[in-house]
Amino acid sequence: MILRELFIIIAAFAMFASAVAAYSVAFHGEASLKEVLSTAFAAVIGLYAGRYLERRLTRG
């Protein structure tokens, strides 16, 4: 169970980081490492907040 959650965190972080970097390069011409990592971190926190809220709502 913990390995599954760890895999989800790593995969989500990598996905969000690559998406932010691709967007930054495509529309701004450069990608700041600080911006990419902070945005990906915030997205993963939001993802887990949504998962937690979803689980709490289904339980009642």
Image (cartoon, rainbow, N blue to C red):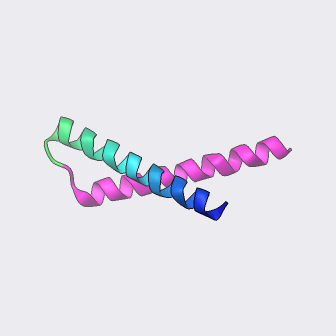
Q: Which one is nearer the viewer's eye here, 39 or 17?
A: 17
Residue 27, quarter of the rendered image:
top left
Query: Which residue lies at the image location 25% right of the left edge and 59% below the top edge?
Result: 33
Q: Which residue is pictured at 63% across the width and 64% down the height?
A: 2
- Up-down relation of residue 3 to residue 8 (above or below): below
Question: In the image, what residue occupies the spot 80% across and 41% down?
Answer: 58
Rendering quarter of residue 6: bottom right
Image coordinates of residue 8 in percent, x first then y, are 53, 53
Q: Position of residue 23 (x, y in %)?
A: 27, 39
Q: Is residue 37 left or right of residue 60?
A: left
Furthest residue toward top: 27
Horizontal side of residue 59 vs 15, given as left or right = right
Q: Position of residue 13 (x, y in %)?
A: 43, 53
Q: Position of residue 32 (x, y in %)?
A: 21, 55
Does the magenta portion include 58? yes
State the residue lying farthest toward the left. Answer: 29
- Residue depicted at x 34% and y 58%: 37
The quadrant the N terminus occupies is bottom right
Q: Main secondary structure of the magenta part?
A: helix
Q: Which residues are magenta?
A: 31-60
Location of the C terminus by quadrant is top right
The number of numbered discs placed on residues in the rendered structure image is 0
Q: Left or right of 34: which side holds 12?
A: right
Query: What is the residue that sits farthest to the bottom in this orientation?
Result: 2
